[in-house]
Image (cartoon, grey):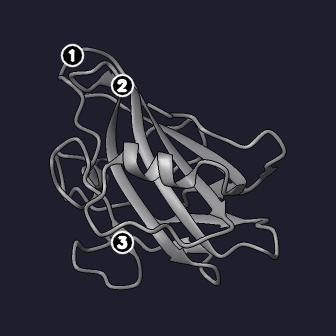
Amino acid sequence: MLFWIAAASAATLTVRAPAFPNGATIPTEYTCVDEDASPMIVWAGAPATTQTYAVVVDDPDGKDPAGAPWVHWVVYNIPANAVQLDRNILVDDKRFLQGTNDFKQPAWGGPCPPAGKGAHRYMFRVYALDTTLALVAGASRTDVDAAMKGHILASGTVMGRYER
């Protein structure tokens, strides 16, 4: 598994989520206990040679059966002129492709940690890429990580917390 990949010389993107400051609590409207809408993610500072973006959201405190961070969202082949993902992205949005999360859905799956087990961290990672990924819709996070290897120009992260 290639989680946490980055090129040694990759630049840093500025990434933010307008709904919550870095390190703060994610509002419930973005979680499984409420609307479960995807939050808006905004980025800046990509190199001029960026061809596409990818966004991966995972929970390093929640694990999949193999022990990897629980994947909540995988979005790729976002056009180079984009500077954000809007709030509440739908499954059938045709502007980019969505991969399959650990809920087995090609969409956003909001924070939903076990009740009473403390806060989990949710890492919203944005990657500026020098290519369009040769993947179909529904690709796994592992497939997206493998396709991005050697193509990351810049990356950045914003982190939110949530507990039930």
Q: Quadrant of the C terminus?
A: top left
Residue type at tag 1: Gly
Give the foreground label among 1 and 3: 3
| Label placed on residue 79 | none
Q: Position of residue 3 (x, y in %)?
A: 50, 34
Q: How many marks?
A: 3
Asked whether the viewer can see residue 19, the reply is no
Q: Position of residue 55 (x, y in %)?
A: 49, 57
- CA–CA distance between discs 1 and 3? 34 Å
Circle 2 packing at 10 Å, graded few (<14), some (14-19), many (20+), is: some
Q: In this view, does 12 lie to the left or right of 119?
A: right
Q: In which quarter of the image is residue 22?
A: top right
Which residue is at 28% across, 62% downward? 37
Circle 1 packing at 10 Å, graded few (<14), some (14-19), many (20+), is: few
Q: In this view, does 129 lie to the left or right of 85?
A: right
Q: In which quarter of the image is the N terminus?
A: top left
Q: Is mark 1 on a helix, strand or loop?
A: loop
Tag 1 near tag 3, CB within 8 Å: no
Which residue is at 82% across, 76% downward? 48
The residue that mark 3 highlights is 97
- CA–CA distance between discs 2 and 3? 22 Å
- CA–CA distance between discs 1 and 2? 22 Å
Residue type at tag 3: Leu
Which residue is at 64% across, 84% downward? 81
| Label placed on residue 116 | 1
| Label placed on residue 68 | 2
Of the two numbered discs 1 and 2 on the same chain, state the one appearing first in sequence: 2
Q: Position of residue 120 (x, y in %)?
A: 38, 26
Residue type at tag 2: Ala
Q: Toward the viewer: 27 or 158?
A: 158
Of the two numbered discs 1 and 3 on the same chain, state the one appearing first in sequence: 3
Asked whether the viewer can see residue 136, the reply is yes
